[in-house]
Every structure is written in C-alpha cells, then in structure tokens.
Amino acid sequence: MKTHNIRSLIIFAIICITGIVASQVYWFKKAFDLKEKQFNQTVTIALQNVAETILSYNQIQIPLSSLVNQISSNYYAVMTNSDIDIKTLEFLLKNEFQKKKLNLDFEYGVYNCQSEKMVYGNYISSESQSIPKKIRELPVWKKDNYYFSVFFPNKSIYLTGQLGIWLFTTAVLFLVCIFFGYSLLIILQQKRLSDIQSDFINNMTHEFNTPISSIMVMSQLLRKEEISSNCPKVTEYSGLITKEATRIKDQIDKILQIAIMDKHKAIYSFAIINIHECLYEALNTIEYRVKEQGGQLNISTKAIQNLIYGDSVHLINVFFNLVDNSLKYNINIPEISVSTFNIKQKICIKICDNGIGISTKHQKMLFSKFFRVPTGNVHNVKGFGIGLYYVHKVIHAHKGSIKVKSTPMQGTEFTIVLPIAKSKINV
C-alpha cells in the first residue's frame, strides 16, 4: 500500500474513532444526567413523605409548598417547623429510602434552633455489616427554623453504578481504542519494514547486476578461439560460468520484477489471446527437461471456449513457473499432466504432478512473498520463494483464482480459473 493511502486511511480511522468516542461521551453524560434527575425526584418524594409524617405526628398542618430544599447536588434540607425525635427520624429515613429502593449511604443531621448548630448526626451505611465511619459536620442552612438535612457522600458512584449497559459499552469502546492504537502501531512498523525491505532489494539487485554482467562478458571472451585453443578446458569452464551467471541474473531479475510489482502497479498488455497458445509455448520451453529426466508431460486441451482477455507474456511465465516447480520438487520420474476445460463462462487450467507434495499447514503460506516450504538443512532446490507469489499476483490481476490441493509424497495439483473473453467465443 502506498504511503499516502496509508496516511489517508489512518486519518480517516482517527476521525471515525474520535467521532465515536465523542458520541459515547455525549450520550453517557445524557444518561447520567437523566439518572441524576430521576434520583433527585425520588429523594425529594421520599424526604417529603418523611417530613409530612413528622408534621402529622406533631399535629402540625402540612403546608402546600414543598418542604424539601436541594442545597447542592447531594445535600438536602427538609423543613419540619418543630422538634424532631432523632430515633424516629432515622427510622423514617431508612424505611422511606428502602421503599424507594435507594440503597446507598447517607448522613443526616438535625438543626437545633436553641444552640444554632447541627446536632445528632449519624452515618447510615447501605451495607448491614459495615465499619462505622466518622460523622462529618454538616453545613448549616438556616438559623430561624427547625429542619433536618440529608447528605449522600457516594451519590456519583451510586449513579454511575446504575448505568450498567453504558459502562459496558464504554469499556468495550476503551478496549477498541487500545486495539486500534496497537494495530496502528503495528501497521506503521510493518510499513517501515516493508520500505526497508524494498529499498534493500532494489539496491541489492542493482549492485549485483553490474558484476554479473561483467562476469558474463569475461566468460564470453574466454570462449574465443585464440584463448580456448591453448587450453581445451577453458571452453568448458567458461560455459559453466556463463550458465551459472545467467541463472543468478534470472533470479535477480525476478526479484527486481517482484519489487516493481509491489511498489508500483504492474504494467500489463491486455488483449484477447488464446490460452492454449500460451500454454503450449510455455510447455515447449520445458518439455525437453522433462524428457531428460525420463518423465512424461501429458497435455489435454478440452476447453472449447479458450479465448481470454489477458497478457500473454505474464501468463506464459505463470505456466512455466508451475511446471518448472513440478520438475524441481520431484524425487520420482516426473509425470506431469496439464489439462484445460470449461466451467460456465470460465476456463480452468489444471496442472498435476507426482512430486513431493506440500503439507496442509504450509499450503496457507504458499503464495506469500519469499516463503519456501521448510526442508531442514537440505537445500537441493535453489530459489528465493517468489515464483508462486508472482503467479498469484498475475492471476489476481487477470481477475482469476488459483487453488492448490496437495498431499505429501503423493503430488500436487494447481487449478487456475480465468474468465473467458466476453467479446468473442472460441472458433
């Protein structure tokens, strides 16, 4: 992925996460405010009932206006206009709060007009077996009448605990943000490593090309008659040098080609082509190697619709790579079969061999760049693990698919599926 695409993706993701977090905070605040409003209403009703009970007990007329005054978010003062019995008040408060299901700690105190102080305070815990807590001195509200006050020290914690689903979604969102940050860090690290890898490959291939070209030129000079005539072995040795240098150069060219395909979109020359012609051209190139090993190459082209829209050069390379692998990874006398057939509006190319096969756990990584099936300390097959990666890239560019089915020591089967050309049908 290109740098500006990653940057755009990161910015878009950050904007989305920020929007989601802001929305969550907004609705969490709304839910908390609603719970607080409900709490205040419930407490006001409960304290009003307690005050009316006390007034009725003292045979004082109940005023039409509310007796409850909310001094702060968690502090309430209730007018009684008469002396208050402490034990009765505590009993009424506990009973009324229990009815309203207000299961939280509270403190209460009574204002004495004669001493002009808050007296007889107590801390009531919602837990039956709680450690007694120190009673604080509640603030005085008025100095001209009898009243009692109630303070809820843990109101915010209590209300937050009532927001069960909101706490859960907030926790999930928090985990998502952590995961997003971690994923972002991994993506940036992988992008950096990928850039380093690409730069290394490009530099390596360019640095190697010059000396290899020089070696090939020198080996050609050694094969000249005026030099080789003095030493017959020179021709043989120079031929080996040329062959090995050519092999190394081909591998370097493949690596460079893969690097170009990864960094930039590969250039394809698409046209309507006959897939059978591409297949035969690739097989003709490698058929002599099969015969050298005493093997058989069976070809069955049963596909009637064999015209596709593709790049013949890249497809020839694909077929060559697959058949070449069937030869390289084979300890038996090679038996390779290549067949084509049609399924609906697609053409299938199947390549089977009797090679060493591939285990199931390695098949998942088979088309990854630079992946080679582990063989321990045995390295009898040369390569960089880019052939099948290239094959997968080309088939994907042709809007096709490739699948592998293999069993160790029983052979491998590759199936390529490509869409046929819509403008023409085979003649």
Image (cartoon, rainbow, N blue to C red):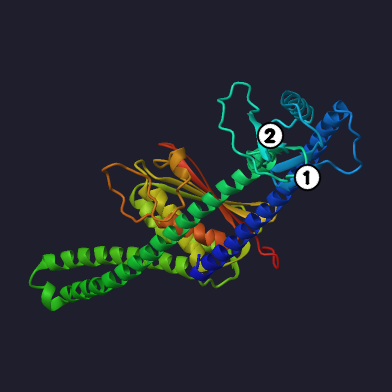
Can you tell which quarter of the image residue 111 is in?
Answer: top right
SS state under label 2: strand
Q: Point out the residue furthest to the top here.
A: 129
Residue 145 in sight in this render: yes
* Left or right: residue 221 compared with residue 291: left
Residue 324 placement (x, y as % from top left): 40, 54
Residue 39 placement (x, y as % from top left): 75, 40
Instruction: Point out which mark residue 96 bears.
Output: none
Which residue in the structure is indicated by mark 1?
69
Q: Is residue 60 above or below residue 265?
A: above
Q: Which residue is drawn at 11% across and 75% down?
A: 227
Q: Point out the residue furthest to the left here.
A: 230
Which residue in the structure is indicated by mark 2?
108
Near-viewer residue (287 or 250): 250
Q: Residue at x 56, y 52 (%)?
A: 177
Near-viewer residue (357 or 76): 76
For the residue marked with disc 1, what is the amino acid?
Answer: Asn
